[in-house]
Image (cartoon, rainbow, N blue to C red):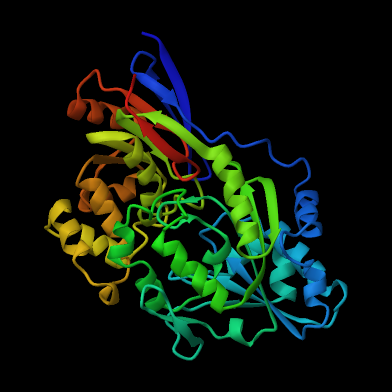
Amino acid sequence: MSMKNFQLPYGKGHITGTAENALLNGVYTAQLPPAAADAVAEVEFALDNPIDSPPLEELARCKRTALIIASDHTRPVPSRILIPALLERLRKYNPDIKITILIATGCHRSTTAGELRDKFGSDIVEKEHIVIHDCDSKTDLQTIGILPSGGTLTVNKLIMETDLLLAEGFIEPHFFAGFSGGRKSVLPGVAGRQSVLANHCSEFIQSPFARTGVLANNPIHQDMLFAAEQAQLAFILNVVINSSKQIVRAFAGNMQSAHLAGCDFLKSCCQIKVPLSDIVITGNGGYPLDQNIYQCVKGMTAGEAACRKNGVIILAASCSDGHGGEEFFHVLSKDESASDLLERVRAIPRDCTTPDQWQYQILARILANFTVIMVSEPEIRPLIGAMKMQSAANLEEALAKARQLVGADGKIAVIPDGVSVIVNAAEQE
C-alpha cells in the first residue's frame, strides 16, 4: 500500500501522520513567497515607503506623545523587530517624544512579565513604558461613540489621550473578521468588553459574509473599521509571516490602505481549492496559536469549509493552556446538543451577547454538521470529551476513529495549517 507522510505544526514542533495515497485528495498549504532575506530590511523598506501616509517620523515630528498598540502573548507577531523599528522612527526627529506601548489583550488574560520579555526582549521591557489593557477596568475606559452594531464603543482612554496613535500587528486569514491586523488592534484589541460583545453578536457571526478572507459586506469588519476611525488610528506596521513565524512581507502607512494592501497580497497567496472530503486533517498553526481549545476553533473552520456534511474534522493542537475560556467550556460541556445550542444562540439579541458566545456559536455550528476529533496532550483529553468532541493520542488513532464513522474508503484532505489559508471547496470531478 502506497503511503504519504505529512506534518502539522503542533506546539513548538510538529506532529507527523500518514495516509494512503489512494484515499488522499491532497496536502494543501498557502503558497507564500520565501521569507524576506533580511527581515529588518523588509520592515525598514515598508516604513520608508508608507502607503497613503506621510512617513512615521514626519507624523511624530511635532507630537508630544505617541502610543503604540502592540499585540499580546497569543499572537505570533515578531514584535522584537517591529517595535524597535517604530521606536526609532518616532524618535528620529523628536527624541523627547513620550511613548507608551499598550498591550492589546482584547478580552484575553493579562500578559505576564515573562511573556512580555519573550515577546519584546528584556531591553524593551526594561526601558519602555508598557501598559497592559484591561477590558473590564472601569477607570481606564472611555466612551467614544456608538458602533454600527448599536453597541457603545469604549476604548482604553490612553489612546484618546495621546497625540499620535499607531499599531503593530500581523495579517492572517481570520475566521469571522475576514483578516486579522489593521483595524483589529483597536476593536477588540484595546476596547471594553461590552464593545467586543456587541461586535461579536450572534447576528453578525451568523452572517454569510463573516467568514475567512471576506471583508466586503462583513458586519464585524465594518464595526472594527468604525472603531479604528473613531480612535484616530493614524499609522500601522503590519506583517505577513510564514509557518515558521518569519516575516515574508511588511506593510506600513494608512490604517485602511496599508491593511488592504496586505490583505490583497495574502489573499493571492493563501487561497486554496480543496475537493470536498470525508475526512479533513488540520492544525492550528502551532505555538502560540494552538495554546488552547478556544483558539483552535479557528483551525476547525478550515476543516468545516472542506469537509462533507457528517464527515470528520481531525485537528491537532497541543492546547497546553487548557480550554482557554471558562464560559466557552461551561456552555459546550452542558447537557445540550450542538444543534440545540446553535439555535438558542442564534436567537440572542445583539445587546445580550455574553462572553465567549461567538466562539461556542461557531464551534456549535461545526459540531452540528461534523464530528471533531482532537489530537492533543493526555491531560487535555477529558476537556475535549466534555466539550462534545472526541480525542486521540496521535493522528493514527484519530484516523482509525474517523474511518469507523465515514467508512474505510473515505477521502482525506490535509490542511496542515488551518489558520493560514482561505479554503474554497469544490466537488470532486
Q: List the single residue furthest toward the bottom.
A: 139
In terms of image quadrants, where is residue 80?
bottom right
Return the x and y of residue 175 as percentages of the image width and height: 41, 52
In terms of image quadrants, where is residue 202?
bottom left
Q: Is residue 411 above or below residue 215?
A: above
Instruction: Look at the image and tell me in which quarter the N terminus lies.
Output: top left
Determine the residue positioned at 78% across, 74% down. Answer: 59
Q: Is residue 332 above or below residue 194?
A: above
Determine the residue positioned at 35% across, 35% down. Answer: 306
In this rendered view, identify the residue nearer to me: 318 or 201: 201
Determine the residue positioned at 58% across, 70% down. Answer: 113
- The mark tally for this picture is 0
Q: List the single residue furthest toward the top.
A: 1
Query: Does any portion of residue 14 appear in the rendered image?
Result: no
In this rendered view, identify the residue nearer to me: 150 or 108: 150
Return the x and y of residue 18 as percentages of the image width and height: 40, 22
Left or right, residue 280 beside residue 10 = left
Left or right, residue 427 beside residue 64 = left
Left or right, residue 256 beside residue 390 = right
In this rendered view, identify the residue nearer to me: 392 or 278: 278
Query: Does any portion of residue 217 appear in the rendered image?
Result: yes
